[in-house]
Image: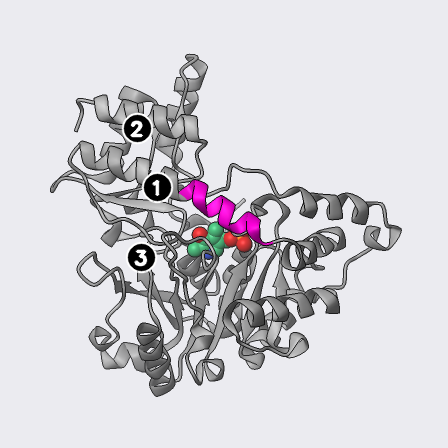
Amino acid sequence: MKLAHRVESLPPYLFTEISKKIAAKRAAGEDVITFAIGDPDLPTPKHILDKLHAAADDPANHRYPESEGLPALRQSIADWYDRRFEVKFDPLTETLPLIGSKEGIAHMALCFIDPGDVALAPDPGYPVYEIGTMFAGGTTYSLKCTRESGWKPDFDAIPADVAAKAKMLWLNYPNNPTGAVADLDFFERAVAFAKKNDIAICHDNPYCDVAYDGYKPVSIFQVPGARDVAVEFNSWSKIYNMTGWRIGMVVGNSTMIDALMRVKSNIDSGIPQAIQEMAMAAVYGPQDVVDEHNAIYQRRRDRIVEGLRSIGLTVDIPRASLYVWAKLPDGVASADFAARLIEDTAVVVTPGRGYGVNGEGYIRLSVTTPDDKVDEGMKRIAAWKGI
Ligand SMILES: *Cc1c(COP(=O)(O)O)cnc(C)c1O
């Protein structure tokens, strides 16, 4: 048999080599500590789980779900945006629930990209933006982001012919993998650039409530006119420790939302309804859990930053997201560093190169590792002689 080009041309899985090393270490009985994955270690809050348990017993929830989401769920998304950002959306035309935002992000390219079309995406960045474009037959023009630019693209540096051709622009602040944040000035420039060049903006905002030191991330919809050109993907995964339940959303421009709804209605049948009910319990239930989780992450963040600085890495303290992004000494390759670290100490970090060429020379550590493991992992790193 012969696989399609789109499958053959998928980049090799970033973790293949590291996964092998982890498996070998575990087989040898070593205590592997991983900072590799951004996946909350704390359980989903009890009041949210209680709703799931009750909803699972309701036979109405055993049948195919409403594909575009229960009207009450879409209302809850609109209510949440109003409460959090004072931005109003019509639930039926300007919100759409997703089976986790990753699914919607990947499928969004099918709404805009025909073979040969171009999407703009940040480098380093979340790999799904580029993969979705590739699946649709398009190509990605990488927007170079660096520490000097605060990990933000310079719209003026995009060649005029590329800007004229591009159909989509991906943005993500608070950012994965760098932890960088963006203010409304930046989003104003993005909206102006998109309007000038007739480009659809997809802003990915799953960390908008994972923030520290009192910082409050913004929504692109706090910029006047953003709704003419943009959607924002969001998710309860990271905010309410719900990665395992798979529920996210997209809000904003009704033409873009309608296009995604039409694509999706031909692919999936929606989110299991008991999980839709659970998501409403998250929105309307007590919100102190969010601050409690952030306080835990903030302590871990500080411990990780301190540990990495103690071995001479350069680290900017992130104000949001689940990640600490650390610069290696000049000339040290991130994959090589990560491989040697796991070999010598059984501590796992993610090589920055996996997020694009501009991620080379950096590593990413997630704060979703339990406290005692953070302490032990940082002790091992501090004692490591391999740097
Ligand atoms: C975690 C993450 C997502 C996906 O979240 P879902 O669990 O699929 O809702 C999307 N974008 C970025 C940048 C992420 O880090």
| Relative to 122, 96 lies left or right | right
Residue 314: image location, x then y, percent: 18, 43
Residue located at (34% from left, 79% from top): 188
| The quarter of the displayed image where residue 93 is located | bottom right
Q: Secondary structure at mark 2?
A: helix
Q: State whether residue 165 is above or below residue 47.
A: below
Residue located at (19% from left, 32% from top): 310
Q: Secondary structure at mark 3?
A: loop
Q: Amino acid at mark 3?
A: Ala
Residue located at (31% from left, 52% from top): 178
Residue placed farthest to the top in the image?
28
Residue 6: tell me if it is visible.
no
Residue bearing the label numbered 2: 378
Of label 2 and label 3, which has the lower sequence position? 3
**164 or 342: nearer the eye?**
342
**46 or 147: nearer the eye?**
46
Of label 1 and label 3, which has the lower sequence position? 3
Q: Secondary structure at mark 1?
A: helix
| The quarter of the displayed image where residue 77 is located | bottom right
Question: What span is colored magenta in the figure?
Answer: 287-297
Query: Distance of mark 2 from mark 3, alpha carbons?
Result: 23 Å
| Relative to 159, 349 lies left or right | right
Count neighbours of disc 1 (C-alpha within 10 A) and say few if under 14, some if 14 to 19, many if 20 or more. Answer: many
- Residue 288 in the magenta stretch? The answer is yes
Ligand 1 closer than 8 Å to label 2 CB: no
Ligand 1 closer than 8 Å to label 1 CB: no
Task: Identify the disc placed on residue 180.
Answer: 3
Q: Amino acid at mark 2?
A: Met
Task: Identify the disc placed on residue 301.
Answer: 1
Query: Distance of mark 1 from mark 3, alpha carbons?
Result: 14 Å
